[in-house]
Amino acid sequence: MGEEEGLHQTPLLDTMFVRGLKRKCFDGEEDIEGTLAGIKAIPSYNLQRQSLLDMSLVKLQLCHMLVEPNLCRSVLIANTVRQIQEEMTQDGTWQMINTQSTGQTSLDRLVSTDILCRSSREQAEGKQVPGYSSFNKDFEDDQTQDSSETMSTSSSVQTPRNLQSNVWEMENPQESRGNFQKSLDQIFETLENKNPNSVEDLFSEVDNSYYDLDTMLTGMMSNTKMGHCDGLETFSSPTTATSNSNCKSDLNELDHIVEILVES
Amino acid sequence: MGVAGGGGNDFQWCFSQVKGAIDEDVAEADIISTVEFNYSGDLLATGDKGGRVVIFQREQENKSRPHSRGEYNVYSTFQSHEPEFDYLKSLEIEEKINKIRWLPQQNAAHFLLSTNDKTIKLWKISERDKRAEGYNLKDEDGRLRDPFRITALRVPILKPMDLMVEASPRRIFANAHTYHINSISVNSDHETYLSADDLRINLWHLEITDRSFNIVDIKPANMEELTEVITAAEFHPHHCNVFVYSSSKGTIRLCDMRSSALCDRHSKFFEEPEDPSSRSFFSEIISSISDVKFSHSGRYMMTRDYLSVKVWDLNMENRPVETYQVHEYLRSKLCSLYENDCIFDKFECCWNGSDSAIMTGSYNNFFRMFDRNTRRDITLEASRESSKPRAILKPRKVCTGGKRKKDEISVDSLDFNKKILHTAWHPMENIIAVAATNNLYIFQDKIN
């Protein structure tokens, strides 16, 4: 996809997203584009793409119930995630913090379908409840954010557990541990927006209605079983609001917890 | 005007019957998950999420009322599958009936295959309308008679009794699928059938339950490399060596079982080149094929993806010969539909008996029919409001923008919980069965 040099130009925006993503937050509010205020409020392509990525990762992680997740759905979502990651890698917005695999190409670092799609037995059986609740408590003490932020953190905490179960299920735990750690990094990075400088700008630019996903979903959402997506609206906003310093300490803490889980 | 099912007569669709509870509160178990007419159209089977199968039979037409068509009434109800627990994986196996396929009738009994995610069962549905009386060794109520009290012998006689329809499982085909079964298809040889899950297709003989042959396997050695799954499969209606399977990437592969035991290499590969101007992050998801059906003639096949239905000529692999837009107005809503998972809904499609028309479902309890000859299409609704006997169905229209005309419905007012995923068309007549959540609607044509 070499033609992505001009990714940030509006014409390409149209072709890349067609009407699907570009109009995501404005489905049903066609009049907004005509006003000056509306033009300022249209979220940037990057923000939309990031939001789609976050949404996809949440879908993969939260689709684990007692019944096996739908493999077709998981594969399609994982492919979407890969697509976004490829594009972000190519246009340089994908910032890698990777201490392990320095010599690998970007494609190797992409999240594998298998790791993302596996169901979490441990989660269902509640084996890790003690560890989970204590970690959650610590995290709550550190943060001053509201409950929505905690909800988003909870989703990211669930990640190590999901991947953890994959390590146990795989035939070669040593090999997959390497993959596991890599992919874990991917997930953490994507869950926390690594654009600290533009965080304030993003937050000020964005219209609140962007996060009001009910705009489109009136009538759709009334009876839909939205259990696993309830946290979605609040999920995207804390991601961008977290400052860089908090990200680092969160990552270190999470890494620490993951190490404990892996060794146990 | 209605869509013609045959001949040049203009006709309209009328409400005939609706089955199921009227309750607003729908029990999950009552949601219909598959609908299928048998080869003669006299029997109509439905399967639901609770693992039950309900078979309706068409009543004999009343000679005194020649214009009134036979109605479908309950013929048999039985529990086909029960919920199970996979102890190895600590996962539940749903009892939801994914597919029902009838076998061609060979004697007085009827046979069908029903499947859930893991197990296929062959059911025999037979009638009993006679009862033997006058046994020597037992009483009328079944108790054994004391042999010493038997002083005379008699021949038991058959007496008529109220019709009883019995369903009994004759074969259970289990433990052959690691992944979820999405399709079953009976072969034209009437001896074998295929079952397809996300990654594999197996060939069975109807008489043999402890063995099946794996004929397609797309599982990669490293599951991390998995990017494509099988979404549907079907045998050719006349050539018993040919079958097709569709994928989540919008491709269809036609395989010939004579070429090799493992049909991993296709004989034909059907794929439409992507339109670069409409590419988005959702392109792959909406290209995923949810259903594939051969025409009755065997010359064409039809595929359903999220927004369209395509008809393919088996002799042309590089593009479909016909494309019909089902609900193009949803293209601008894909992100929201992705968020609420509606984009993963699997719609089915079906041909009419003469292959001149095709039908598929949509949202808001709408379903669409396309006439391949006149290129006309119609949108109808399965609703209780238009459920008066022989009431003509009014065409519906979705307003995509601008001023909404009277009787039109705007895209934002569509109810995405009311989805018509399963429809069936009588093999010979213009009778259609439409499953709307827990209700089954039957519509017939009204010849002017």
Image: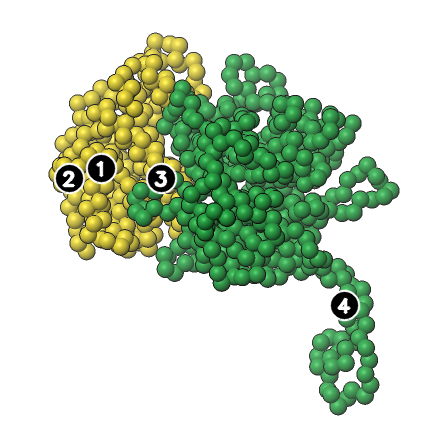
Chain colours: A yellow, B green
Q: What residue type is disc 3 on?
A: Thr
**Cα distance in 3D space between marks 1 and 2:** 9 Å
The chain identifier of the residue carrying mark 4 reads: B
Which percent across, then down, holds residue B29?
54, 49
The chain identifier of the residue carrying mark 3 reads: B
Quadrant of the frame with the N terminus of chain B:
top right
Pointer 4 with pointer 3, Cβ within 8 A: no
Q: Earlier in the sequence, mark 1 or mark 2?
A: 2
- Which is more foreground, mark 4 or mark 1? 1
Q: Which mark is residue B131?
A: 4
Q: Is B397 on the left or on the right of B196, as rendered?
A: right
**Cα distance in 3D space between marks 2 and 3:** 24 Å
Q: What residue type is disc 1 on?
A: Arg
Q: Which mark is residue B227?
A: 3
Q: Which mark is residue A101?
A: 2
Q: Residues within 10 Å of mark 4 (few under 14, many from 20)?
A: few
Pointer 1 with pointer 2, Cβ within 8 A: yes
- Decide which of B347, B342 is in the foreground and name it: B347
